[in-house]
Image (tube, helix red, strand yellow):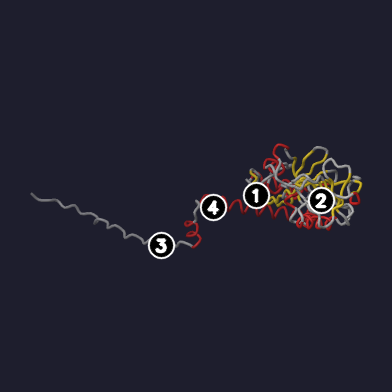
Amino acid sequence: MSRTIKRGTPPRRPAPRRKQPVRKVSRMDRLVAAAPVSEATLRRIATWTITGGVVALGLVIATVLGVPGMVGTALGEGAGRAGFRVTGVEIVGQHHMDSNTIRAVALEQPSLAMPLVDLVAIRDRLLAYGWVEDAAVSRRLPDTLLITIKERTAAAIWQDNGQLTLIDATGALLDPVDRNAMPDLPLIIGPGADRQEAGYQKLLAAAPALRPRITAATWVGNRRWDLTFDSGETLKLPEMGAGDALVTFAEKDGSHPLLGRGWLSFDMRDPTKLVARKPGADVARTLPTDETSTAPGPTRAELQAGADT
């Protein structure tokens, strides 16, 4: 049986494959691939940066050229719609002042679009609060205000007309004080005593050995101090030379203890002498330099009328 061979075109050989060019990976691509965040996140960051730069440049140009405020506001609001809008407040350095108050001050703005937030106004309002000695306010793009607070340090409690208030070493008023939870701080008493706090601290520094024993100080007649000790005695200091008088008293107490020896008060309003009074006595006694708590009773010549003004 014969086979019929059909003649036709020979079978087509497959075309050889073209070599694909090797794609070079740029250094930027490698950096993007090695970044700890996704490419989408990097794109958003780039968009925020570019948008923020454009908006900032637009506001600068508008200011330099005197473009009406309406245009600047429109640019700022446009940035807000693009994502540059305050949604959070980060606070650093706050310990005593209420954080909710700080946030309320920061967010009290005609517009929360980031370019339109008035940082200077926020700082000025914060400085009106007693605890705030200084403040810094800055933008953290795209949506956060960073507020750094430097607080004052409480130095004493001021009592006036029955009200207790914390003050710092300059006399700045900080906070009301609860009588049932008074901090362990010196107590100063009387009208205007808060404005004398710096001078009072200087007075205490003159006799550091006595400082831990002084529990209260009363500003008398807007001119001088009466000091109260933990053993109950009161020391009346002169208007002039109070520091020297306190040093003299400290020296006397150091050589022959006076505090805690049954005396009621000591009067040094005349800096040249120390007059002491016993409880219930109608007269006061002038103490010589070598006076001790066990010395014999005073003679009539040593007695002095105890006028107390």
Q: Which mark is residue 296?
A: 2
The amino acid marked with disc number 1 is Val
Residue bearing mark 3 = 22
- SS class of the residue under badge 1? strand
Q: Given this view, does label 3 or label 1 mark the residue nearer the observer?
A: 1
Circles 3 and 1: CB atoms closer than 8 Å: no
**Spot occupied by residue 134 in the image (x, y as percentages of width and height):** 73, 52
Q: Which mark is residue 219?
A: none
Q: Nearer the viewer, residue 147 or 183?
A: 183
Q: Which mark is residue 92?
A: 1
Query: What crowding class fits label 1: few (fewer than 14 Cα within 10 Å), some (14-19), or many (20 or more)?
Result: few
The outermost residue toward the left is 1
Mark found first going from the N terminus, 2 or 1:
1
- SS class of the residue under badge 4? helix
Question: Alpha-carbon distance for marks 2 and 3?
Answer: 112 Å
Q: Nearer the viewer, residue 8 or 79?
A: 79
**Spot occupied by residue 119 in the image (x, y as percentages of width and height):** 72, 49
